[in-house]
Amino acid sequence: MNKRILGLVLVIVLVFSLVACAPAAEVPAETSAEAVETSEAPASEEPSAEAEPAGDKPLVGFALFDNAMPWATVYSKSVFEEAEKRGYEYKFADAQNDTAKQVSDVEDLLAQGIELLVLTPIEHEAAAPCLEAAKEAGVPVILTGRTAKGEVGVDYVTYIASDFYWEGQEAGKWLAEQSGGKARIVEITGTVGSSAAIERAKGFYDAIAEYPEMEVVVSQTGNFLRADAQKVMENAIQSLGNDGFDAVYTHCDDMTIGAILAMKQAGMTPGKDIYTVSIDGIKEAVQMVVDGDMSCVVTCTPVFGPILFDTIEKYLAGEKLDEFIVNPDKVIDATNAAEELPFAP
């Protein structure tokens, strides 16, 4: 009997030993309840057939100014698609039109190990810390869309953009010709301190300076936002009355659209009894030129992908770059809007 009991005990000990030595089952890591914000670009639904391997190409960081704006949305799509087509890895951050956030975004991108920074500044002077941070990290910077305070060749490699002064000048020239050099103008400007707002205003004022009967009766910022511009226009109508102005000039299509909404709500007929002159050339605006609500739009193309990556590759190859590389534009009005509409971004 004692032998049987001893044998049973030995069997039980052996079974527990085997269980203790078995490998533990893998437990899946718990998923966080909060979505984690990432600066990685969303993957394309289908990989490009023309994509090339990244190889020794630099990791590119994009510091965007406000991807909610229609112009910026097309810009982002253009540069991301071109990066993927040419086999570049990239990271990006959206400052949401907040200068302090853009400085922080640049610092975060540098901490993630980017080797080249593409910066679209919100403000000219306030973007200087972005350039300083990149310089301290030894990361070259290419400015796109707007300038930042700094010295080319020292603080940044080159600047790629439309010619904002030319845009404002063309807008002023078109209005002078169409109005016979006589107009009372409501100007709605872009973000105060941005290079786009500064140059578009300067070009416009220089163009109308030789016409003594062309006068800007109201000038106020709409921050490049449709809702802000609509409010500015409502206030202008209340102050001047429906007959107190003949033309509206704004620094971007979104603001012009906001101004047109305000004028229509006040019983006015923009594009017919009021000249509406805009800058950007997004599809919605060009369609409004076709429909007659908008009189003229000077384009400011948001398609930067090809010219940007051509420039990057010239820089990597050691080629000398121009200090300012112009992304060319055109004037669209009733004479050519229908033919330009299919090409509008």
Image (cartoon, helix red, strand yellow):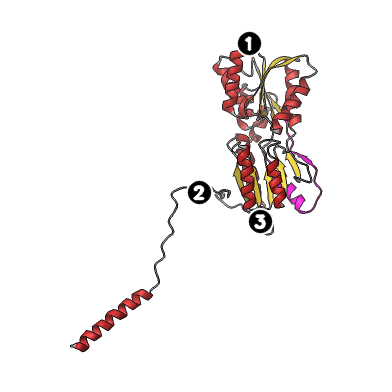
Q: Which residues are magenta?
A: 303-330
Is residue 111 found left or right of 163 in the rendered image? left
Q: Quadrant of the C terminus?
A: top right
Seen from the viewer's position, the closer of residues 341 and 323 is 323
Tell me, for residue 36, which label it has, or none: 2
Task: Kindly identify which residue carries mark 1.
Answer: 243
| Sequence-first tag of 2 and 3 | 2
Picture quarter containing residue 323? top right
x 62%, y 18%: residue: 270
- Label 1 crowd bin: few (<14), some (14–19), many (20+), radius 10 Å: few
x 24%, y 83%: residue: 8
* Residue 81 visible in the displayed image: no
Work out whether 128 lies above or below 276. Answer: below
- Disc 2 residue type (three-letter): Val
From the top left corner, tell me how far across and down residue 256 is, in percent.
62, 25
- Label 3 crowd bin: few (<14), some (14–19), many (20+), radius 10 Å: few
From the top left corner, tell me how far across and down residue 338 is, in percent.
65, 28
- Disc 3 residue type (three-letter): Glu
x 60%, y 45%: residue: 93
Task: Kindly identify which residue carries mark 3.
Answer: 52
Work out whether 336 lies above or below 132. Answer: above
Picture quarter containing residue 265? top right
| Sequence-first tag of 1 and 2 | 2
